[in-house]
Image (cartoon, grey):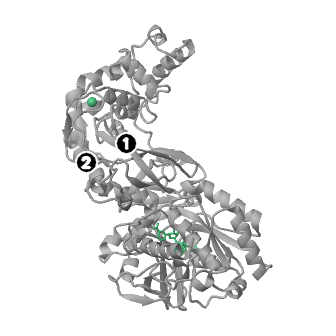
């Protein structure tokens, strides 16, 4: 990098920061930003007399937008130095041990959200301020008060600043985006972006609707007298703040590495996004001695996780046809390694989303893959366009059967009931785990069965013979027998599986269970009033069921005859106990699987529901409990941990 390039890089970083912090609409990935940042840092180290005043290395990154009133922090807020691998960690440790050799460490997650400073005076929350430039931020107290995990008052009476990160849990993020997709609104790129955007709303009721979560990571001004940071954090959690899923004290390199590996391995199972682990010197006196650079504490470092966002190129847009005929566009992208997995495809949700994002073939895009969710395209980098991009035209014909598509605006549908994709996918669905759970009916085999003409609908599965199967490619005696056995085993299944396997629109596993319990095989004769009177079944579901039965009554009867699902028996009346006839919600991980705990409670006569409402009697929570726990606290629902629950039934 020469001087000219250095100047350009600083300008570019500042442009990126403006889009990232002020507009909540990043122009590039953190990875690209970080790389350029480190190049700038390197240049500055070698040419210390040329450091530009507006270099991002000289100040905390946020830039304040003009929409809010400004407010000063009582003591400065900081950024963090980054390390990206174990070599860099070792270097950081050497540097830090030179400042003080008798230290230990405290490790906790680096939450990927927006920083927030809370000022409590006389035990009352008086101000909530964004980090801003570290000295002055945006005053967003009203918005902050809508966050359930921010206590409005605390036992601690002296003035204190509590610092932490505001995040949106991953499941909440998915739910928000799903709702936005339905309403034709632009999607949030990622949970961090959704959290930052929701926090800085001029209308606090919007903030309130987003289920933000506050996770504290330290204090600013305070009069606390703790020797160790770990003890101080314990005290903060006791005041009513939310704990992180993992935090540990440790001695040095090896232990830090092992905690890092543990956290990284569990990354996907946590409710919130993490972008790394933060390591802090645990002795507070040593922290004070070490002090700060212009921008970061010397006693702390962020050990980053591999990036989950990458830049790639759209090669093509392909179409998939589901069992209901809905055509879903999928992007084929330049194969890209994201956190150890090569991604070649990403969902585009629907055709409106392609239009809204103006996604073109050959576009450079940011792609996000986190955990086991389907990779998505979160942003088109329009500033990278060079004219070679080709706009995408909505299809008018089914890519599988060529019949004309029904254009419902957001959705395009193939209406041909015999379309290969529809039939094949409905058979795969019929055989899937929550339905008849027939092993061995994957895409390849179902396609082979369909193409050979042996199976034209699910009914045909039950008259397959070994001779027929042996005519198919790749089928030998054992494989054929296994498949026949699996189909035979599906007979006599629980009744809800039978209802679920029919693939009725809007009727999923939960509704199938409800219907099965209420009506058994009588579900085909239930009236609209009867159906709607079931808990959790609304008008739209009832109409969909009635319409399905009207059209398919004969097929249902045939399948009923073939499969002979078990007529549900009424549960035996449970003995008297505190959970009998109560509505219970489970959240977080417990000593047994949630399914096992659910079964236990159901055997006691409880109804286990998926979401918390005023009707909920108990929430039973485990480690890393999610937003359901916050909601329950807010509604005043009784919350029990697993042990308390077990004590009540002993
Ligand atoms: N994509 C872009 O265009 C773009 C632009 C600017 C910045 N960025 C990204 O922003 C980051 C740099 O910004 P930064 O200066 O805010 O630093 P940072 O976000 O990397 O780290 C500091 C912040 O981490 C947060 N944090 C989370 N958990 C914490 C914990 N346990 N202890 C202490 N702090 C914790 C705090 O809010 C703190 O302010 C980089 O990751 C960079 O890639 C991206
Ligand atoms: Zn078709």
Residue at the location (70% across, 77% down)? 282
Position of 74 relative to 400 (above/below): below
Q: Residue 301, percent across and down?
A: 64, 73
Question: For the N terminus, which image quadrant?
Answer: bottom right
Q: Residue 257, percent across and down?
A: 71, 61
Badge 2 residue CB within 8 Å of ligand 2: no
Which residue, as the protein is rendered here, is positioned at the far top? 467
In depth, the one of 177 and 561 nearer the eye is 177
Nearer the observer: mark 1 or 2; the answer is 1
Whether residue 103 appears in this view of the structure is no
Sequence order check, earlier mark of 1 and 2: 1
Q: Residue 591, percent across and down?
A: 61, 52
In the picture, the disc for residue 316 is: 1
Q: Which residue is mark 2?
A: 538
Q: Residues within 10 Å of mark 2 (few under 14, many from 20)?
A: some
In depth, the one of 265 and 599 nearer the eye is 265
Helix, strand or loop under label 2 = loop
The quadrant where residue 394 appears: top left
């Amino acid at each position: 990098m020469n001087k000219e390039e250095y100047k350009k890089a600083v300008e570019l970083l500042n442009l990126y920061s403006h889009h990232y912090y002020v507009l909540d609409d990043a122009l590039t990935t953190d990875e690209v930003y970080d790389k350029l940042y480190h190049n700038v840092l390197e240049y500055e180290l070698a040419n210390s007399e040329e450091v530009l005043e507006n270099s991002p290395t000289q100040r905390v990154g946020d830039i304040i937008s003009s929409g809010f009133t400004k407010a000063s922090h009582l003591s400065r807020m900081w950024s963090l130095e980054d390390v990206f691998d174990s070599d860099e960690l070792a270097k950081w440790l050497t540097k830090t041990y030179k400042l003080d050799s008798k230290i230990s460490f405290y490790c906790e997650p680096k939450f990927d959200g927006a920083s927030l400073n809370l000022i409590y005076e006389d035990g009352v929350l008086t101000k909530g301020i964004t980090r801003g430039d570290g000295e002055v931020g945006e005053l967003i107290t009203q918005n902050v008060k809508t966050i359930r995990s921010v206590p409005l008052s605390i036992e601690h009476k002296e003035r204190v600043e509590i610092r932490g990160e505001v995040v949106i849990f991953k499941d909440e993020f998915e739910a928000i985006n799903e709702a936005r997709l339905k309403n034709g609104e632009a999607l949030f790129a990622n949970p961090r972006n959704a959290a930052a955007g929701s926090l800085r709303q001029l209308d606090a009721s919007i903030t309130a609707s987003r289920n933000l979560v506050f996770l504290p990571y330290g204090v600013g001004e305070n009069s606390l007298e703790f020797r160790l940071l770990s003890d101080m954090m314990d005290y903060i959690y006791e005041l009513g703040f939310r704990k992180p899923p993992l935090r540990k004290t440790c001695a040095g390199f090896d232990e830090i590495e092992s905690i890092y590996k543990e956290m990284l391995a569990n990354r996907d199972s946590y409710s919130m996004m993490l972008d790394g682990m933060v390591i802090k010197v645990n002795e507070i006196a040593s922290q004070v001695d070490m002090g700060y650079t212009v921008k970061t504490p010397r006693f702390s470092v962020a050990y980053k996780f591999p990036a989950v966002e990458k830049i790639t190129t759209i090669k093509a847009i392909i179409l998939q046809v589901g069992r209901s005929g809905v055509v879903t566009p999928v992007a084929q992208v330049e194969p890209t390694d994201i956190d150890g997995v090569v991604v070649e495809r990403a969902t585009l949700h629907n055709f409106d989303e392609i239009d809204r994002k103006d996604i073109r073939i050959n576009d450079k895009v940011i792609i996000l893959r986190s955990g086991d969710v389907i990779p998505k395209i979160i942003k088109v980098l329009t500033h990278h366009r060079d004219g070679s991009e080709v706009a995408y035209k909505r299809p008018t014909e089914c890519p599988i059967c060529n019949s004309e598509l029904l254009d419902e605006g957001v959705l395009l549908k193939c209406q041909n009931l015999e379309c290969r994709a529809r039939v094949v996918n409905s058979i795969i669905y019929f055989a899937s785990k929550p339905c008849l759970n027939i092993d061995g009916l994957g895409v390849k085999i179902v396609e082979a069965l369909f193409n050979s003409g042996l199976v034209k609908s699910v009914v045909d599965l039950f008259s397959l013979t070994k001779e027929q199967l042996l005519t198919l490619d790749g089928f030998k005696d054992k494989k054929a027998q296994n498949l026949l056995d699996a189909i035979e085993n599906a007979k006599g299944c629980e009744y809800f599986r039978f209802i679920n396997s029919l693939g009725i629109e809007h009727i999923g596993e939960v509704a199938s269970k409800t219907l099965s319990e209420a009506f058994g095989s009588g579900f085909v004769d239930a009236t609209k009033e009867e159906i709607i009177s079931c808990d959790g079944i609304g008008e739209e579901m009832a109409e969909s069921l009635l319409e399905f039965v009207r059209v398919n009554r004969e097929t249902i009867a045939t399948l009923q005859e073939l499969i002979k699902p078990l007529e549900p028996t009424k549960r035996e009346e449970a003995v008297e106990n505190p959970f009998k006839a109560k509505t219970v919600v489970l959240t977080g991980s417990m000593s047994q699987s949630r399914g096992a705990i659910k079964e236990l409670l159901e055997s006691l006569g409880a109804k286990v529901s998926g979401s918390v409402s005023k009707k909920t009697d108990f929430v039973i929570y485990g480690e890393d409990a999610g937003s359901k726990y916050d909601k329950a606290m807010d509604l005043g629902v009784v919350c029990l941990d697993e042990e308390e629950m077990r004590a009540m039934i002993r």
